[in-house]
Image (cartoon, helix red, strand yellow):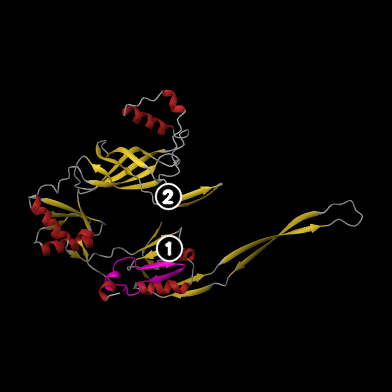
Amino acid sequence: MPATENHRGRYLVKIVATAICGCFLLWPGWSANLAWAERIKDLVSVQGLRDNQLIGYGLVVGLDNSGDQTTQTPFTVQTVINMLSQLGVNVPASAATTMQLKNVAAVMVTATLPVFAGPGQTIDVTVSSLGNAKSLRSGTLLMTPLKGADGQIYAMAQGNVAVGGAGASANGSSVQINSLSTGRIPSGATVERTVNTPLGQGQYLQLEANTTDFMTVAKIVTAINTKVGKGTAAAIDGRVIRVTAPGDTDTRVAFLATIENIEVTPDSGVAKIIVNARTGSIVMNQNVTIDTCAVAHGNLSVVVSTAPVISQPGPYSNGTTVQAEVSQIEVQQEKGSVMMVPAGAALADVVKALNALGATPQDLLAILQAMKAAGALHAELEII
């Protein structure tokens, strides 16, 4: 790998430490005090510029006997009858209870309408089964209106559903890879209505930081004023930045493009340790520090074993053979050890100290909580 690519690859991941199989790993080539510059466009968003969620209800047809079981999903039959009536096909009311539609599935269609999207632009849609269809593979979504939160139709969706999963069954046995009840239609919807999105109000633009951090906001304000001109940007609070922008739209777009490409070194934030109690993963940032403390670690296990015991009657007696069970309970406790954990002001020192304990991820969770309660761990402990 060329040197430039290797240098760039070190900055692709911000997570600098993780706990895998009970031991912490520090990525090679990282420094505990490493800091790098980011573009402002990666740190903030322009207030008012947002995507909009769309949703619709439709039918997928052309399935290979893998559609809804209409006796359990009556809304599928009702939808088919309503659709046929709109196309000029009259279906008797009695057919609603006798129709067996194995190739049709009722689905929910969702999509995201990008900001500034205009009529004629195409967007991707996701199709999800609403009933008990076994698979949407080889299905075709019929024309489905997609509505916004205000109830207005903003796009129309239709097309062949692409399903990434696969499955097969025979004689009561089945195998499945990925999900068969959800599919996607690339460019499957056409935008019909535009959402009016003004680029700022009056002479000001509001930039919202992705996270609330006074230091990072102060650095962004300083960088903008240095690059564009003094007094251009001003901090409203720990998240919002007010920027004086040109009046006409064309110049305002170029102005925003200039600001977005200014590089700023963000503050690393508060010291935090994230613990996933389900998987045992532990991730910490570079601001975590510990004070000198003593940790005692040992394991306690209880083993219960049951063995059958046969009781035979005496010779020439009228007794019967009886089987009984005898249980033995054994408590095993590994010899614990008290280990001195030295103070560490750098992430590498913290990782080295925790690795020396030799504990499992579940034990590390208890140890970190105890260190936090004892005041030896200087970090916010968050359990997810």
Tell me what residue is drawn at x 76 percent, y 55 percent.
324
Q: Badge 1 local density, few (<14 within 10 Å), some, or many (20+)?
A: some
Distance, label 2 to label 1, CA atoms, is: 26 Å
Q: Residue furthest right?
A: 316
Task: Locate residue 129, reporting x and y percent.
Answer: 40, 42
Task: Locate residue 358, reporting x and y percent.
Answer: 48, 72
Boundaries of the magenta span = 7-34
Q: Are marks 2 and 1 in contact (CB under 8 Å)?
A: no
Q: Badge 2 local density, few (<14 within 10 Å), some, or many (20+)?
A: some
Residue type, numbered disc 1 = Ser
Task: Locate residue 193, reporting x and y percent.
Answer: 20, 40
Tell me what residue is drawn at x 49 percent, y 67 percent.
360
Helix, strand or loop for disc 2: loop
Tell me what residue is drawn at x 41 percent, y 23 percent.
92
Left-right relation of 336 to 343? right
Quick check: 123 above or below 339? above
Mainly helix, strand or loop, the magenta region?
A: loop
Mark 1 = which residue? 281
Most foreground residue, 267 or 367: 267
Most foreground residue, 23 or 108: 108
Q: Quadrant of the N terminus?
A: bottom left
Residue type, numbered disc 2 = Ser
Q: Is residue 5 magenta?
A: no
Is label 2 or label 1 in front?
Answer: 2
* Label located before the other in sequence (2 or 1): 2
Quick check: 240 above or below 135? below
Q: Is residue 18 magenta?
A: yes
Mark 2 = which residue? 179
Most foreground residue, 277 or 20: 20
